[in-house]
Image: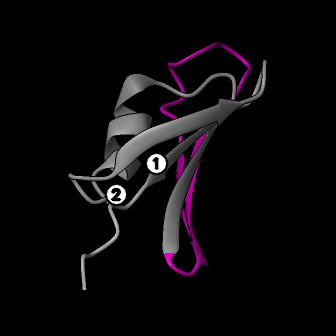
């Protein structure tokens, strides 16, 4: 898991964060990004680089805090 705290100039008084977690449920591997209110775009891009470039956006959850789910493309064996 990787967490990035937001730039203090994002939203006054609201320290946002972005967290990314790798979740393995063979054969699937998901990457969940949780973005809290007050996070700035640079926070999101800082953790998004840890997600494989060919991962596919498959779902989202939340209304204030947002979870974006990206799934790695399974290897063809």
Task: Give the residue drawn at x 72%, y 23%.
Answer: 14
Q: Is residue 23 left or right of residue 13?
A: left
Task: Give the residue drawn at x 32%, y 38%.
Answer: 45
Q: Quadrant of residue 12?
A: top right
Disc tally is 2
Q: Please tell me which residue lies in front, 29 or 19.
A: 29
Task: Give the residue drawn at x 47%, y 24%.
Answer: 40
Q: Is residue 49 left or right of residue 3?
A: left
Crowding near pointer 2: few (<14 within 10 Å), some, many (20+)? some
52 shown above or below 66? below
Q: Position of residue 60 (x, y in %)?
A: 63, 32
Kindly identify which residue carries mark 2.
51
Q: Is residue 3 magenta?
A: yes
Local secondary structure at mark 1: strand
Q: Furthest-bottom residue in view?
A: 77
Task: Give the residue drawn at x 35%, y 32%.
Answer: 42
- Pointer 1 with pointer 2, Cβ within 8 A: yes
Q: Position of residue 54 (x, y in %)?
A: 22, 52
Q: Which residues are magenta?
A: 1-27
Q: Position of residue 66 (x, y in %)?
A: 68, 30
Local secondary structure at mark 2: loop
Kindly identify which residue carries mark 1.
70
Q: Furthest-top residue in view?
A: 12
């Amino acid at each position: 898991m990787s967490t990035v705290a937001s730039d203090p100039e994002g939203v006054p008084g609201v320290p946002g964060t972005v967290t990314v977690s790798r979740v393995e449920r063979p054969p699937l591997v998901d990457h969940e990004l949780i973005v809290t209110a007050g996070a700035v775009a640079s926070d999101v891009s800082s953790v998004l680089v840890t997600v494989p470039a060919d991962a596919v956006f498959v779902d989202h959850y939340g209304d204030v805090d947002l979870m974006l789910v990206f799934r790695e493309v399974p290897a063809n064996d």
